[in-house]
Amino acid sequence: MHYKWLLLDADNTIMDFSKASHKAFDQICQDFKLGNPADLYPIYQKHNLAAWNAFEKKEITADQLKVDRMAFFTKAIDRLDIDPSTLNQQYLHALMLNSELYEGVEDLLQELKHDYILSIVTNGLKEVQRPRVARLGLNQYFASIIVSDEIGIAKPDNRYFEYTFQTIHNPPIKSEILIVGDSLYSDIQGGKDFGISTCWISHGRANKTNIQPDYSISSFLKLPNILIT
């Protein structure tokens, strides 16, 4: 299949979100004297994932997500003296400053931009996504960047992909579009529901769901193996 447009997820697809998140969390633990990050991160992650799942299912808004995850976290560690909104703001700022691409990604983007239209499709938050894209010098590679928090719709909602179609002039037909991402639910199911090809970044994980991507690769750097078939 010859694709013309690649929709690329950001976190844990081209950017090492897990590494940046740990660094940002370490920073707020130090700033707010929360305790040992190694002990507290699993607690935060539990509530963070629950909030994101609720957001993607349209049960809460992005603004609620930002507060809820920290409110439940501070309650769980018995630190109700800390304002969840302030804690979230500090975390997001640290996350932006600590974000980085996986090794080799920028070289691959440089190659891909000559043969494909590239867009970032992310469910991330506006306080983080565009600032770090700019800080990392990525704007030069992408024809459009679609941030769910800016448009009020998140993957896997079909309306997110319909909006994405409006971001470039004369978009290719659906059979010429490939979405690449690490989330089976938001990226792969969303792409399948919209009728475009899907490529899952597994990072070595087993797929224990009924969601079947068209392609599976272990990392973004393996994408050329898919594109030349």
Image (cartoon, grey):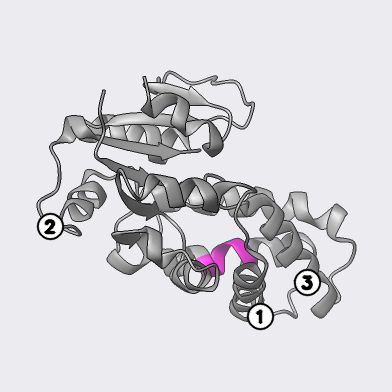
Pinpoint residue 227: horizontal percent, then vertical percent.
37, 28
Q: Is 62 in front, or is 145?
A: 145
Using the image, tell me which numbered label, if any, was put on residue 83: 1
Q: Can residue 36 be seen from the camera position used here?
A: yes
Amino acid type, label 1: Asp
Q: Quadrant of the N terminus?
A: top left
Pinpoint residue 74: horizontal percent, then vertical percent.
72, 67
Numbered disc 2: secondary structure: loop
Q: Is 124 in front, or is 66?
A: 124
Residue labelled with disc 3:
27
Q: Is residue 68 magenta?
A: yes
Residue labelled with disc 2:
169
Label 3 and label 1: CA atoms lie apart by: 16 Å
The image quadrant of residue 33 is: bottom right
Mark sitting earlier along the chain (1/2): 1
Which dot, 1 or 2, sits closer to the camera?
Answer: 2
Pinpoint residue 169: horizontal percent, then vertical percent.
12, 57
Looking at the rendering, the stretch of residues picked out in magenta corresponds to 66-70
Residue shown at 40%/19% (left/top)?
A: 212
Residue furthest out toward the left = 170
**Dot 1 surroundings within 10 Å: few (below 14), some, or many (20 or more)?**
few
Label 1 and label 2: CA atoms lie apart by: 44 Å
Numbered disc 1: secondary structure: loop
Amino acid type, label 3: Gln
74 sits left or right of 30 in the view: left
